[in-house]
Image (cartoon, rainbow, N blue to C red):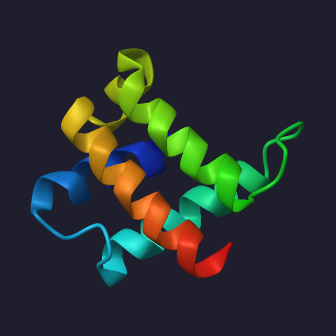
Amino acid sequence: ASALGRDWIAAAGSGIAPDSDEAQELARRHVEWLAGIPGTPGANREYVTGLGEMYVADPRFAANYGGEEGATFVRDALRVYAEAHL
């Protein structure tokens, strides 16, 4: 999880687009990580996009992604991924 967070922060700061191949690979990894957490409802579209919204809305979660700007990048990348794959 910590490596994923660092990778998200680096990607958000690099200027790549949320729909880029690099961001979508991070989104895939993120969804895979979520699916491996016991007790989660599974990696479905609503769950993943809802988490993305929460990452932006709650500063405690946004801090894991470098703040609101980083969390917005994660949210947008997860949304693109979820719409295409979930």
Q: Residue 19: image x %, image y %?
A: 32, 75
- If the image is split into quadrants, where does the C terminus sit? bottom right
| Residue drawn at x 56%, y 64% as measured from the top left | 29
Is residue 9 shown left or right of residue 27? left
Quarter of the image for residue 41 reads: top right
| Residue drawn at x 45%, y 48% as measured from the top left | 3
Quarter of the image for residue 33 reads: bottom right
Rendered view: 81 above or below 3: below
The front one of 59 and 13 is 59
- Residue furthest to the right in view is 39
Q: Residue 16: image x %, image y %?
A: 17, 69
- If the image is split into quadrants, where does the N terminus sit? top right
Let me know if residue 1 appears in the view. no
Total tally of numbered discs in the picture: 0
Rendered view: 68 above or below 80: above
| Residue drawn at x 40%, y 50% as measured from the top left | 75
Let me know if residue 68 appears in the view. yes
| Residue drawn at x 29%, y 52% as measured from the top left | 73
Q: Residue 32: image x %, image y %?
A: 68, 62
